[in-house]
Amino acid sequence: EDAIPRQKLVVNDKHALDRILDDIRLDKSLSWTETLSTTYPQTHEVDVSNDLDRELSFYKQALHCAEAARKLAAEHSLPFTRPSDFFAEMVKSDAHMERIRQRLLDETAQIKRGE
Amino acid sequence: DVDIDTAVEKKRRNKQRVLMLSSRGITQRMRHLMNDLETLLPHVKKDSKLDSKSELRLIPELADLNNCNNALYFEARRHEDLYLWASKTPNGPSIKFHVQNIHTMDELKMTGNCLKGSRGIVSFDKGFDETEHSRLIKEVFIQIFGVPPGARKAKPFIDHILTFSLLDSKIWFRNFQIIEKDPLEPNGPPQTSLVEIGPRLVLTPIRIFEGAFSGATVFSNPEFVSPAAVRSAMRRQAGDKYRSRKD
């Protein structure tokens, strides 16, 4: 016995979405330094299953936005680059970074041995 | 009087605090993902696991108790599927996502690093401006994932960028370290390059509700198929194969 295909109820209430967006939108007069948000002027047109192309496309977006953000930061005189003598706790610990470095070294050694 | 006016003018700031919590039954990988987001976002307040899966109305109350105006709720189902609720509390909206392809910062393949608590740039591609629901998602993400300047523990420099990209009607999240010096030529001209820090994840929007964890549905994704349905279809297919061979 075949199951009766159930029609999924699709909702896309555009007016309500616009109204909600207007309700929650941050003040337009807010300086860029308050949010640090940037928009890439392109969409991604790559094959999703191709890992290399896909990640390259994301990388391009990030690079474009990082450079745009650096210019904007300079305009707003917001400190951007970390001075080389500024030390503070990092997201990944030194021990973890050492493990990453060791893995990279191991990999290059492996490649050398293969040759 | 003039002084008071300028003081009010100056105070216009982006104030965001995010409550992050999960349901019971999350796996190790999901927990690590939450920890990663907590270290990247200094304006996040983590709370203990929520006991009940049906009482989501409690979350806006918890957010209020913690002085938060946003909530990120990770809901694990069947110990394998992860859903993420991103919500503005107390008035909404809330967006429910299905989370896939999680990679955490623990993985050794991603070699970047950044200051703990530095404010990241949030970046979106143009696709977010094209439909009503993605515009709304963009605004909510700017408020939740953008670190406000007054955040406690925030560091004064910018050294990483969070990217949200729309592809295949899913949202792909990446986090890169911004390097401004060429490691091979430290005295040469500054050349921006990026190294991935992690975590990685892919979000499929499922529904947008008008309220905070409540209210009417204003958007539902017609393409979304629940992961349980996908698995059961796969099992049925395998069963059919066996049955046809047996006959």
Image: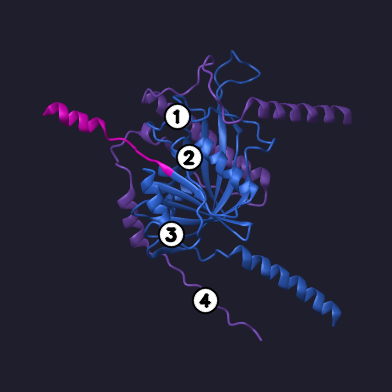
Chain colours: A purple, B blue
| Magenta-span inclusion, residue A42 | no
First-in-chain label (3 vs 1): 1
Chain of the residue under the numbered disc 2 shown in the image:
B
Which residue position holds label 3? B208
Residue A32 bears which disc, if any? none
At x 88%, y 31%, the residue is: A114
**Residues indicated by labels 4 and 1 sit on the same polypeptide chain:** no
Is the C terminus of chain A in the top left, top right, bottom left or bottom right quadrant?
top right
Q: Number of marks in the image?
A: 4
At x 43%, y 36%, the residue is: B147
**Residues indicated by labels 2 and 3 sit on the same polypeptide chain:** yes
Query: Is the residue marked by circle 4 packed among few (<14), some (14-19), or many (20+) residues within 10 Å?
Result: few
Residue A7 bears which disc, if any? 4
Query: Residue B70's spot in the image, x, y percent?
Result: 40, 47
Q: Which residues are magenta?
A: B1-18
Left or right position of B93 against B80? left
Query: Is the residue marked by circle 2 packed among few (<14), some (14-19), or many (20+) residues within 10 Å?
Result: many
Can the viewer see residue B136?
Answer: no
Residue B188 lies, with reference to residue A26, above or below; the image says: above
Chain of the residue under the numbered disc 3 shown in the image:
B
Which residue position holds label 2? B123
Residue B113 lies, with reference to residue A83, above or below; the image says: below
Amino acid at circle 1: Lys
Left or right position of A92 against B63? right
Query: Is the residue marked by circle 3 packed among few (<14), some (14-19), or many (20+) residues within 10 Å?
Result: many
The answer to whether the residue labelled 3 contacts the one labelled 1, judged by CB atoms less than 8 Å apart, is: no
Amino acid at circle 4: Gln
Dot in front, 3 or 1: 1
At x 53%, y 35%, the residue is: B39
Which residue position holds label 1? B153
Q: Which residue extends farthest bottom?
A: A1
Chain of the residue under the numbered disc 1 shown in the image:
B
